[in-house]
Image (tube, helix red, strand yellow):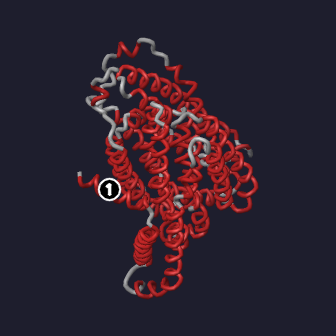
Amino acid sequence: MLKTNLVMNHKPSSLSKNYIYNLIYQVLVVIIPIILIPYLSRVLEPSGTGLYAFNYTIVTYLSYFALLGVQLYGTKAIATKKDDEKHLRKTFFEILTLKVITSLISISLLFLIVLLIEVIRSMGGATFSLSPLLSPQILLIQGLFLLANLLDITFLYTGLENFKGIVIRNSIIKIMTLGLIFVFVKEKSDLWIYALIINGGEVISQSILWMDRKRIPLFKNLNEVKMDFKPTRHLKDMVILFVPQVIILLYTSLNVTMIGLLSTDIEVGFFDMSSRIINTVLVIATALGTVMLPRISKYHHEGKHEEIKLILDKSLKTTTYLAYPLMVGLLVLSTIFVPWFFGPLYVDATNVLKFYAIKIGLVTLSNVIGIQYMISTNKYKPFIISVSIGAVITLLLNIFLIPVYGALGAVIASLIAEGFVTLYQIISTRKEIPFARYILETSKAFIAAILMGVIIYLMDLGFYQDLVQLLSPRLSVDFYTLIILGIYGILGVITYYLFNLIFKTNVQMDIMNRFIKIFKK
């Protein structure tokens, strides 16, 4: 096979190093919302965050069409062609061509939607009253995200297992956008500025990857690329991956849309802010999935089934080891965390976040089974069926639950849907991979997390008022609440570690050893 500059400059890093790179970025992804969300929730208020979230779901629908399954399919395709520069470059440009076309269509559709909104508004009447949250101005600014999709070539970097470049780029942009938000977003009317900073940052972030042309000589020997250039050869597999992503969208982003239509903008704000916390936590728990996808795709292409089983077993145990304490900790501390973090206007969102924390465990399992295994090994049909089950359950339950319970109703529907999705995936893959056994083997970490939660709960029940009385004369409410949460957090980490030590949880020792080896190098 032809191995030249493009390939030689991008030898795949070890899974451990890629995981560390990805985890470093995911930690940053966690820290920034921790800093930013309390500020935004107070400045923009529930109605402002709800307005942004409702309009953003429309852009999200269009962005899914623009991406057309590219991130998953592109990563897989690049991973299997990485040892042949000629075919790798051809594959890249063929996939990119399709993505540019779909992105331009999506951008055109957004302009059409904005035009229709303005026409309907100018006509007056009750027609527009069905969607009072729609904002043409915010939609147009959020449309920059579609331009970012057009420029996005992340699939090339992930396929080549070059996570370092992605981490550096994303980290710089996120820190810059954080600073700009604090400088320019000062009141509720600055919502459009917030939208411009966030989505403009995405455009800049995606543009930077194109500047790495010395290490990735994409435009070398373009005449070879033109020969037998057929973008449509990828269309079928991209559409196959696009279908489940659209269905997943129905039981994720559709929640916000349905809450906006069946409830109020305040409830949209409660759900959106709770979702941000859950998704922030999930990036830590599922960070390994981004690294695993190209490696498992390559193993499947090479017929290394036993290696796949081994790597999935380790992946499931590692991700659940991280996910279980995060899930339990958030569930136990929601009552203190919500009013402190979001502000007093979000007190009614406490139960929303508390119940939604359960999603962390369910999504962690479905990420390993569905994304890392089923997608990587081309098991598209059972994957599509699983997410279709989730979409139907979500849609039906939302119709009945949201009008009565608002955002909490959408959370209940989502949890039931995620449970059925995970269950079906376990059953449909049982002949190839014993995921049920792998999950049972994580019981020690799960029990350790439950015991950790019990100790934190009892600590809060018995000593919270004493801590408040001790700290409140000297400190502000926000600061002493932060200290109390910090005490509970440290207590949780220590007890979780000790319980796993007592139970002799193997994955804990493996993780510690890997970190030690990596940092020694």
Hey, which residue is sitting farthest front in the picture? 306
Hey, which residue is sitting farthest right in the picture? 400
Counting the numbered discs, the total is 1
Visible residue check, residue 519 = yes
Visible residue check, residue 132 = no
Seen from the viewer's position, the closer of residues 283 and 484 is 283
Which residue is label 1 attached to? 515
**Residue drawn at point x = 61 percent, y = 36 percent:** 113
Q: Is residue 466 above or below residue 335?
A: below
State the image coordinates of residue 23 (x, y, percent, origin top left): 38, 52
Seen from the viewer's position, the closer of residues 403 and 314 is 314
Seen from the viewer's position, the closer of residues 388 and 501 is 501
Q: Secondary structure at mark 1?
A: helix
Instruction: Tell me the amino acid under the disc marked 1.
Output: Phe
Query: Which quadrant holds the N terminus?
Result: top left
**Residue drawn at point x = 69 percent, y = 39 percent:** 123
350 to the left or right of 300 = right
366 to the left or right of 464 = right
Mark 1, Cα crowd under 10 Å, few <14 / some 14-19 / many 20+, is few
State the image coordinates of residue 322 (x, y, percent, origin top left): 46, 59
**Residue drawn at point x = 31 percent, y = 34 percent:** 11
When asked about the image quadrant of residue 32, the answer is bottom left
State the image coordinates of residue 387 (x, y, percent, origin top left): 64, 43
Q: Is residue 262 above or below residue 145?
A: below
State the image coordinates of residue 315 (x, y, percent, origin top left): 46, 50
